[in-house]
Image (cartoon, rainbow, N blue to C red):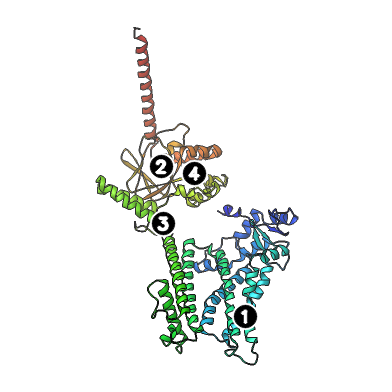
Amino acid sequence: MISNWSTRKPLSVETGPPQAPYQPKPSVTLMEAAKATSPQSERLNRFSTDSGSPPPPLSPTAVVVKRLWGGRETSKRLDEDSMNHSPYMLHPASDFRRRWNLLALAVILYTSIDLPMDIAFFPEIEVNAGFIVNCIFDAFFIVDIFINFRTGFEFHGRIVMDDKASFQHYLHNSFVYDCIASIPVDYFAFLTDESSTSISKAPKIIRILRMFRLIRLLRLPRLFRYTKGYASTFHTGYVRVVKLLFLLLLFAHWNACLLFLVASLQSFGDQTWVGLMDLEDEMVSTQYSWSLFMSLSHMLCIGYGVYPPETLPELWAIIFSMSLGASLFACIVGSLTAVLLSLDSSNATFTAYMNELEAYFNHRAIDSQIRLDCLEYLRLRFGNDEHQSLNGLKMYSEKSLLSALPDSLKRKLRFAEAGSLLSKNPIFNASFFPKNLQDNVASKLVPEWHTSEEIICREGDLPTGLWFVKSGSVQITCDGEKLGQCQPGSFFGEGLISNCLEPLTYTTGADNSTVLFKLSRENYLEVVKFHPDLLEILVLVCQQKMRKLNMEDWKKDRSDSAQLQKERVAQLKQLFDDNVNLTPKS
């Protein structure tokens, strides 16, 4: 398994500005990096420990933390990936950059929630904890601009670490939005009246200037841009559900703040909804609760709120709220429905198949025992060790799923499924066999599922392949007499091993629910062609198994009778030919 992972190479690093189209320049740096990150050294560095044993498995919490923050392997790989570049450049996937992005995520999320509420419910700028926090956040994003200038970027699958190229790349992408969103509007507005810690009595133009704080919401696209890298490590459907729910709640929050702001700009007159409900002097939590109630009422199209609008500004605000809110709610609900269905599409496919199968059984009046056998087979094939019930099983077509993957990945997937089976067999673990023998055999194995007491192959039939037992057990019988069992890791179908195809000398049947992997005759001949020593060992193993089952004498008698039958057939054929030759011509 280690050899499969070791073939993955890190992204190369370019030290020059990209051209259009981008062409990597051959340099000594790339050659040295390639030598330093050879598959052998990378495999040892990534999977070896001080004790020489593989690292212990991580807990679920540790797995999530490692996905978000990286680890020693990530840092070591990035050090090799970022060789010979300016020490003042940051790798976009470095641990420091990942931690900085997470901090930026938290700040942007806080800003998107706090800023609309601060403008609507706290119209005055005062030197308090919130004001200081906002100034710190503005300083944070100003520093973030300089960090973005010194961070490399990915271009056509390569990491560009050149300082001039990174500067131009950031300057022509999100620099303008980040720069505008980082303007400390609160600080500038506060400086207009240095003699007081409040600007509640400042001119109206200063109060309007505070509206420019909304430009901080231009940072919101960065929230989704940063989360995109972390979301790729989780299930796509769950990520989409969380994103849609977040957008729904965020719009409801913004809409609630907008409705209260419209009433605030009218000085909470008697005709505003705040004045009609006497909420002007209530606590902020009470005011926000009623604002959120009105916002959700508009989004769900259940009414105008407590009172219909009586002023023109509120009328247009409610028209905007109902139109955009209802449309957004419908789109999000539709998207959520599609996502939730796609999350368990395989289960829906299995449920539809079971309904159709039940209708077929009823139409054909199938016996109840056959129905139970069919259900047992479906449970065995589509179930697992943790889920043995028919309810909630997932149905999929493995052939169609893997059709889009290259052969190399198909071999890896097949080895991941059947590699443990071959590792239990001492034949395929022999040291004198090449290491790729297990990989070659595993890639050609096809899974089979057999229910209890089901006949797999009968005595006298020509074998169509070799069967390897993965789970369950297979009973071997001869003339109705039980001779033995095949346990997980063993195989049967020895008639295929000899040069001339021989009939099976025994009958095999599943003792219980059994999972097998079959190596067909064509694939078997292909494997033996490249590994001739395997044939000799399989013959010896078969002879030993025959002696253990006391079948040598029976096989000899069976072969003698078969030879006698061949001789009799030849004599009858010769007699028929002689009779034809003696027939007079007409």
Q: Amino acid at mark 4?
A: Lys
Task: Give coordinates of residue 549: x percent, y percent.
Answer: 39, 41
Among the two numbered marks 2 and 4 on one chain, the one whose residue lies closer to the N terminus: 4
Q: CA distance from mark 1 to mark 4?
A: 67 Å
The answer to whether residue 512 is visible is no
Which one is closest to the eye, mark 2 or mark 3? 3
Q: Circle 2 is placed at which residue position?
A: 548
Q: Which dot marks residue 345?
A: 3
Q: CA distance from mark 2 to mark 3?
A: 50 Å
- Which quarter of the rendering shows the C terminus? top left
Q: Foreground residue, 581 or 375?
A: 375
Q: Foreground residue, 324 or 224?
A: 324
Does 320 sit above or below residue 464? Answer: below
Q: Circle 1 is placed at which residue position?
A: 185
Among the two numbered marks 3 and 4 on one chain, the one whose residue lies closer to the N terminus: 3
Q: CA distance from mark 1 to mark 3?
A: 50 Å
Q: Is disc 1 in contact with disc 4, using a CB cutoff of under 8 Å?
A: no
542 vs 180, left or right, is left
